[in-house]
Image (cartoon, helix red, strand yellow):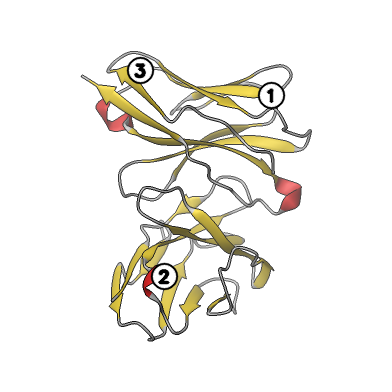
């Protein structure tokens, strides 16, 4: 699976949009971009995924660049409960749907 | 059930003992995954199943670790002759079609 690069940490103001970047320059054509988050000691929580089109759901939006080498997860109105570690993962369904977690970005939402 | 259920939530065992960790996935979910997570680290893949078939066990650290899912539903991760370095949170996840995973609350294993 392609490797991803994320900033180790970032702060965000409550009520503002949080934009979380992820680089995946070696992504191949059949690999999806997945985002998960882990709040404190809970299990990771699925947020969103996409292949090449931008995606939006009730939790977030995913913007994938045209060359697919990077993506941005957008939390439109961050709340204190969004404080978590956010993982960007590239996964090939053909290779067994195995998620490989990297270091993630530790997001702290401040009041 | 409504979610992925793992038991026990906490397990303290003496070094050298065997432990069995149980995972009850969401009903109907085809794929089941086991991960291990050390404090402050991201989850580390151990193994996964599609139905009852173990598809990939490349993440199992050594031959003391094994997993089974005999009827394609409940899975058991067994660690034989536990060592202190096995102490971690063990997490199970299931997936309907290999897409978004749903994780359980995990089993916190402490080997003393």
**Depth order, front residue of B71/A5:** A5
Q: Residues within 10 Å of mark 1 (few under 14, many from 20)?
A: some
Q: Is residue A9 above or below residue B6?
A: above
Q: Are marks 3 and 1 on the same chain?
A: yes
**Depth order, front residue of A12/A17:** A12
Q: Are marks 2 and 3 on the same chain?
A: no
Q: Position of residue B86 (x, y in %)?
A: 41, 70
> Would you say residue B42 is visible in this rendering?
yes
* Tag in front: 2 or 3: 2
Subunit under mark 1: A
State yes or no: discs 3 and 1 in contact (Cβ < 8 Å): no
Q: Position of residue B88 (x, y in %)?
A: 38, 63
Q: How many callouts does the rendering have?
A: 3
- Name the outermost residue toward the top: A16
Subunit under mark 3: A
Q: Secondary structure at mark 2?
A: helix
Q: Secondary structure at mark 1?
A: loop
**Disc number for residue B86:** 2
* Tag in front: 2 or 1: 2
Residue named by callout 3: A77
Q: Is residue B9 above or below residue B95?
A: below
Location of residue B1 (image quadrant): bottom left
Q: Is residue A39 above or below residue B81?
A: above
The residue located at (47%, 36%) in the rendering is: A104
Location of residue B22 (image quadrant): bottom left
The residue located at (39%, 66%) in the rendering is: B6
Q: Position of residue B60 (x, y in %)?
A: 57, 68
Residue named by callout 1: A69
Q: Position of residue A85 (x, y in %)?
A: 39, 37
């Amino acid at each position: 699976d392609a490797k991803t690069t994320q900033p180790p940490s970032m702060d965000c103001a409550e009520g503002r949009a949080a934009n979380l970047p992820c680089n995946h320059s070696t992504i191949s054509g059949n690999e999806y971009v997945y985002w998960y988050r882990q709040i404190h000691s809970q299990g990771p929580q699925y947020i969103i995924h996409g292949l090449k089109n931008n995606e939006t759901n009730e939790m977030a939006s995913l913007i994938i660049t045209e060359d697919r080498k990077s993506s941005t997860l957008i939390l439109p109105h961050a709340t204190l409960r969004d404080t978590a570690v956010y993982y960007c993962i590239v996964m090939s369904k053909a290779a067994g749907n195995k998620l490989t977690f990297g270091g993630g970005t530790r997001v702290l939402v401040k009041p | 059930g409504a979610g992925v259920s793992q038991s026990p939530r906490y397990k303290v065992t003496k070094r050298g003992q065997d432990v069995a960790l149980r995972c009850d996935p969401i009903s109907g979910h085809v794929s089941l995954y086991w991960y291990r997570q050390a404090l402050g680290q991201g989850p580390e893949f151990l193994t996964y199943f599609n139905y009852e078939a173990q598809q990939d066990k490349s993440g199992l650290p050594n031959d003391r670790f094994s997993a089974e899912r005999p009827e394609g539903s409940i899975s058991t991760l067994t660690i034989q002759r536990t060592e202190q370095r096995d102490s971690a949170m063990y997490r199970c996840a299931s997936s309907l079609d290999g897409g978004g995973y749903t994780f359980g609350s995990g089993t916190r294993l402490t080997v003393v």
